Amino acid sequence: MQLMVDAVAGVGNRHGVMIDPIKRRCSVVRFDRFTRQVPFELRAGVIVEGKEFVLPLATVGDGEAFEFLDQRTTPCAIELIGIHAASCIKVKLSIVAPFKPRHMAFSNMPVIGLRVTAESFAGIFRWEKRPLNLKQATVFVELRSERMTFSARGEDAIDVRFESTRSAQWPEMKDAWDAKEEKVAQHDRLVATRGKRVGQRFEKLLALDGTDALDVHWITHSGPMFEVKGERWAFKYAQQFASLDAVEQHVRNRPTEVFDNAVKVNGIIGANDFAGSTNHLLSYTLHSWAINTWLAAKGEKFEEHFFGVWEGLCYMTSTLDVEFTQAPFYLAVWPELLAIELDHWTNYTKPGTNLLGAAGEGTAYFSHDMGAHACANAQVYSHDMHVEETANWLIMAAAHWRRTGDDAVIRKHAGKIGGYLKFLEKCDTTGNGVPNVGVANTIDDASPAIQFGREQVYLAVKTMAAYVAGAAILKHVGGANAAHYEALAAKIGRQVETHGWLGEHFGTLLEKSGTLKNPWSGAEMQAAEIPGWDAAQIYTANALGLLDMVGLELPLDRELLRKELRNATQKCLREYGCVHSDFHNENPEQLANMLGLVGVARSPGWISMNMARDIAAFYRGVDLRHLADRYWNWQTTTNTQEPKMFFETFAGNNLCFYPRGVAVWGFFDALAGRVIDRVAGRREESWPLGRLRSPDLFNAAW
């Protein structure tokens, strides 16, 4: 594929590498903000007749560039390939992360593998002459940086020291970027398990048959860095590695472990019949998610573990709506991580009286996020998303329980769940079942109708899903009112079908007139016809995918949903995917009070929300697979120009380095029509778009 920015990192260990082959440079993924990472050059290549040929992660210097370059991205690795025409030598550098789903100890190891291989291929490269027919060649790898110091350690290791910057929230911070900074000394080590140190680099003479390699492990070890409610927790890996020396001993004892795991994991995931663009998205979104993750522990018990995910360039920790969109990945691949978040989120709820006054007695709602940067101390986002985040938690909690059969989280919090459901119910002040207060939502660069309109179709369906999910939980844990919430869900379904369906698609709002309250400014606006109230939009099915994965049905006409998924997609489709709605915002000044958190644009779109819609579509036999090409085109368009990693937003806004693209991992189950509900003992596949290879990652033998 084309040369472009990419990155790999372990899960939650804050140890990774970001590459920018266009500008021939790299940076360290550590505690720093993504735009301020420590730069370095990764000089790797082959020596032919005394001349160094250098892959595009370092300046050429007194060497030469390869005649041809290629780049590959896989779930566990980035690969850079160079071809030397005169000798027909193909050199490959693999940068490998320890990703092994459902294995925290392995995936959190503070290790990145660097492997250089070389082989000679038969014939000639294109029409170039081949004057050299070499049997052996020396390959090399070296780090260079003005911000790092290097010191030899024995015959096969080099110590690397530099400073990283840890950012943290503080009580008076104005927004997510107004963080306190702390310089943190880093002591890393490069360890060659196949090869030798030559000065400040590593080399190995290889037979050019592809059977040998130069292997270097880049290892690190840091003290407690992540703060939970004012207390710093150690990285999970500290439970198995007491020091940097202990990490070194591990890689020496298991020198090919990281590389062997990559072959196995990549093989399991790659055994599919998806398009190339979809497979690229699977790998690229996983990489972008991994560089955002934190995994810490202060003990061995479940509640003594913390898993959190930055919201990309916004740096907020475990934003609930972001993790909701990512939840298909967790259900399909790694549900234990979601369980940790579900448990911790309950420590960041707020009393319903904040919004509802006396009517909210005995109720609670969820915060938007847990904190920012290296902290989970309190919500940082400037306003609440009362209904949305509370509904998100209930849906995820039910989906996780049904998928895994593990009811520990819902039993632990059984006494609170009724209060969450009651809060949603009290947010309807008209009696039609649909919330009309507390309705500001995550789509914070959209038109007023989508972003904070009363009686939104999006939140109506999501609340319906929360009632269905909540009722299922109440039945299981012995709570009261399950039938009441099932009846409320049916009531909302009737409202949406009667007032929301506009002939070809569902509208944005159920009513065209009313009062809007801007959550950014607090201003209220009365409108006889709210601009964009009847626009087609892509959020009607947003809540469906997670429940589809576990076989929970909503009381909403299935054929209307199929028409909606086809028609709204067509109306909202643009170059790189669908925009929020087909309404064009002609009044960007209304967004002036958004504190710089979002960009101002007439009609922006979010890639991951397209993916969430696609999952629901696949389950209903609506084929939108071709849209993955558009999503991938946006990633290549941006990341061949500058570092952005998964770029969520197009046509406005700047949500980059974003984790949310892992929603695409829900395609595995959706394309198979796969339902896994361990509570009911169900595992079914309906293949709504015809049979194809779409592996069951939940039950994979990793």
Image (cartoon, grey):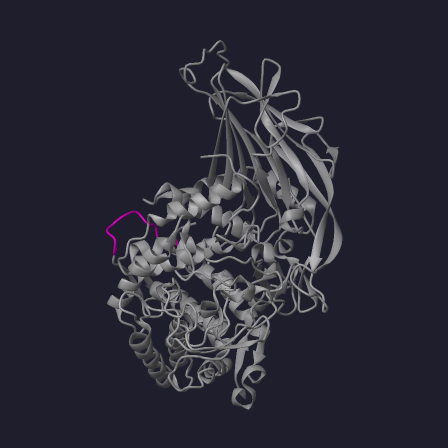
x 55%, y 90%: residue:
358
Residue 226 as seen in the image, left or right of residue 275 = right
> Most extreme residue toward the bottom, as rendered?
358
Residue 695 on the magenta segment: yes
Residue at the outermost top position? 131
Q: Position of residue 659 (x, y in %)?
A: 52, 54
Q: Position of residue 337 (x, y in %)?
A: 51, 61
Horizontal side of 565 relative to 87 (left or right) equals left
Magenta-colored stretch includes residue 172 = no
Relative to the observer, which residue lies in front, 456 or 238?
A: 456
Residue 224 in view in this figure: no
* Residue at x 55%, y 38% (from the top left corner): 95
Residue shown at the point (63%, 20%) measured from the top left = 63
**Which one is in front, 550 or 405?**
550
Q: Residue at x 62, y 35 (%)?
A: 25
Work out whether 563 lies above or below 149.
Answer: below
The image quarter in which residue 507 lies:
bottom left
Give the residues drawn in magenta, as a range.
687-697
As displayed, is residue 28 above or below residue 174? above
In this picture, residue 223 sits left or right of residue 84: right
